[in-house]
Amino acid sequence: MGKDTLNRATAKLFGIEPGKKKQSQNVMGDIECFTVHDLRGTSRSLLASPSVQPHVAGRCLNHKLKGVEGIYERYDYYSERSNALEKLCNMAEKEIIVNRLIRK
């Protein structure tokens, strides 16, 4: 898997295939095109809102601690990350439900 595999697959869903004369069909409708990095940024922003500590939110995105702290801090924050990601999923689920109700 290459570095851009997921972004290329996502772009293809939007009917964008760089280097191809015939573009594929846009199956994403009116959703604005996004990249994997966009999803990471949005996730990080949303993790800040439900009172998730910044270092836990960073670990959810697999960020490493820098300097001396990164050397000595060996705790994986697994339960804290699990709770934070559960909050994120609940927020996304509520947003999806609200959008479905509005579109009806």
Image (tube, rainbow, N blue to C red):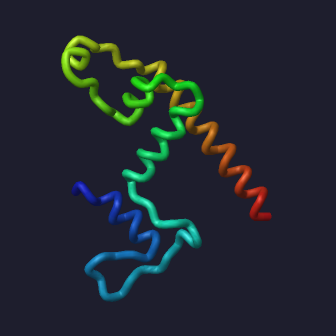
Q: Which percent across, then down, holds residue 64?
A: 28, 28
- Which residue: 19% across, 21% down? 67
Q: Is residue 19 left or right of residue 33?
A: left
Q: Quadrant of the N terminus?
A: bottom left
Q: Which percent across, then down, holds residue 54?
A: 44, 26
In which quadrant of the rendered view does residue 78 lie? top left
Front residue (pair 66, 2): 66
- Which residue: 58% across, 71% down? 30
Question: As displayed, is residue 83 above or below residue 96?
Answer: above
Question: As displayed, is residue 38 above or below residue 32?
Answer: above
- Which residue: 48% across, 46% down? 42
Q: Quadrant of the C terminus?
A: bottom right
Q: Is residue 68 left or right of residue 44?
A: left
Q: Which percent across, then down, holds residue 17?
A: 34, 76
State the residue lying farthest toward the bottom: 21
Q: Is residue 83 left or right of residue 95?
A: left
In which quadrant of the rendered view does residue 101 lie? bottom right
- Which residue: 23% across, 55% down? 3
Question: As displayed, is residue 64 above or below residue 15?
Answer: above
Question: As displayed, is residue 89 above or below residue 12?
Answer: above
In which quadrant of the rendered view does residue 31 lie? bottom right
